[in-house]
């Protein structure tokens, strides 16, 4: 049986670990709240934009659409995996990296693939591979985007990616991210960013005869880039919320495990303590007995 | 003869305005009139305006909310007016 001091030391170290994990859980819970708020704030804009685009596009013919709708023979593909900068979030980052690798090896096995990683974890992983970004037209240093996640910064990044698509550097752009379902559940989502997949929006019930100022085509041209930027923004917000959700769950489990471990250790400790007391008494009694004889 | 003011002149006309950006909801409430920096020049909206969708360029949105004035700077966006409900998707 391990000696008392050893067990005591282990109890102290496990409880300080528990303190850290439970603090991290609290921090993640607070950050999760804020990240979720950001998603809720974005939703009215996204819904309205979708509705407007839906209203506008069911009138126009789909033939000569925007440049971002252009379907080309797919030779070069840009993948954008979104991970976090920090670990300790369960399988959060591993899932994205696994999914990205799977897509590269299966769907785009014979294509020229480039990876533009957002978040340190994916960046660290793909930096060493042949898929790392060559050339400089794409935005670099994307780790800091999570520090202050707002639409302006995201739309700058999205703008650069869109230009790369426009200039035919890539024929397809795909985002891989964790979709936020709830604090405990995240879904790995693979979304095509460009060319735009025209999702059949249900026609709005109030079909009004709108006046278009300056013109319908102009407004569509204006709205489409916005919706692409918003798609990236939404993916980032989702991933951000998912990250904190995943970390909160992971830390919750770690705290529970630590508590359980402390209980087990305490039991062992008390047993050892009792055994040693019994031993001492036996020795004293034995000693007294020896003196009496 | 004393002419009484008509009741409909006393009640200020009210529309509902909402200005949203992807980051947050900037303004939401009842207003009397509003003017926008449209792509083809400034234009105003008052009650019972015909349905319109218009794009904005950089400039200021001036809102008259029953006496109090609000100013919002935008760098672009889209406005939709339908049945006295105005929604601005601002940048």
Image (tube, rainbow, N blue to C red):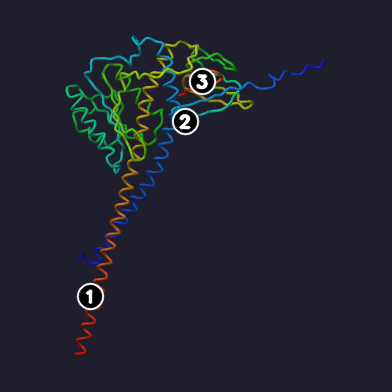
Residue B35 position by quadrant: top right
**Label 3, label 2: how far apart the Cα atoms are:** 19 Å
Q: Position of residue A199 (x, y in %)?
A: 35, 20
> Which residue sits at x=47%, y=19%?
B78
**Label 2, label 1: how far apart the Cα atoms are:** 70 Å
Residue lying farthest left? Answer: A110
Residue lying farthest bottom? Answer: A293
Residue A31 or residue A188, whichever sits in front: A188
Crowding at dot 3, Cα within 10 Å, few <14 / some 14-19 / many 20+, comes out as some
Determine which residue is flagged by label 3: B59
- Is label 3 on the same chain as label 2? yes
Quadrant containing the N terminus of chain A is bottom left
Above-or-below relation of B53 to A282: above
Q: Chain of mark 3?
A: B
Of labels 3 and 1, the one closer to you: 1
Quadrant containing the C terminus of chain A is bottom left
- The reply to whether discs 3 and 1 touch (Cβ–Cβ < 8 Å) is no
Determine which residue is flagged by label 2: B24
> Which residue sits at x=28%, y=15%?
A71
Q: Position of residue B55 (x, y in %)?
A: 47, 16
> Which residue sits at x=45%, y=26%?
A45
Q: Chain of mark 1?
A: A
Residue lying farthest right? Answer: B1
Determine which residue is flagged by label 1: A279
């Amino acid at each position: 049986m391990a000696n008392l001091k050893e067990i005591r030391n282990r109890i102290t170290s496990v409880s300080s670990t528990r303190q850290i994990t439970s603090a991290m859980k609290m921090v993640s819970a607070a950050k999760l709240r804020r990240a979720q708020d950001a998603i809720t704030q974005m939703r009215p804009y996204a819904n309205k934009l979708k509705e407007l685009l839906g209203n506008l596009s069911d009138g126009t013919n789909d033939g000569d659409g925007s440049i971002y709708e252009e379907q080309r023979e797919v030779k070069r593909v840009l993948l954008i995996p979104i991970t976090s900068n920090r670990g300790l979030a369960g399988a959060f980052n591993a899932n994205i990296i696994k999914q990205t690798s799977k897509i590269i090896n299966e769907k785009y096995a014979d294509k020229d693939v480039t990876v533009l990683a957002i978040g340190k974890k994916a960046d660290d992983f793909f930096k060493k591979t042949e898929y790392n970004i060559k050339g400089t037209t794409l935005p670099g240093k994307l780790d800091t985007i999570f520090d202050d996640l707002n639409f302006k910064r995201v739309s700058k990044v999205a703008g650069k990616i869109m230009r790369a698509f426009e200039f035919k550097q890539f024929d397809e752009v795909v985002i891989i991210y964790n979709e936020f379902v709830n604090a405990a559940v995240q879904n790995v989502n693979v979304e095509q960013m460009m060319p735009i997949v025209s999702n059949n929006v249900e026609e709005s019930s109030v079909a009004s005869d709108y006046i278009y100022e300056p013109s319908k085509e102009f407004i569509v041209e204006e709205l489409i880039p916005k919706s692409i930027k918003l798609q990236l923004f939404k993916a980032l917000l989702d991933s951000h919320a998912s990250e904190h959700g995943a970390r909160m769950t992971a830390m919750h489990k770690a705290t529970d495990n630590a508590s359980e471990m402390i209980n087990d250790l305490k039991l062992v400790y008390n047993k050892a303590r009792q055994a040693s007391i019994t031993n001492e008494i036996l020795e004293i009694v034995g000693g007294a007995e020896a003196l009496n004889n | 003869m004393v002419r009484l003011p008509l009741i409909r002149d006393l009640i200020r006309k009210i529309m509902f305005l909402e200005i949203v950006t992807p980051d947050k909801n900037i303004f939401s409430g009842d207003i009397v009139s509003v003017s926008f920096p449209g792509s083809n020049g400034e234009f105003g909206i008052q009650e019972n305006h015909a349905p319109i969708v218009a794009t904005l360029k950089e400039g200021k949105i001036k809102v008259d909310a029953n006496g109090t004035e609000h100013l919002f700077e935008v760098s672009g966006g889209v406005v939709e007016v339908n049945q006295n409900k105005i929604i601005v998707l601002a940048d």
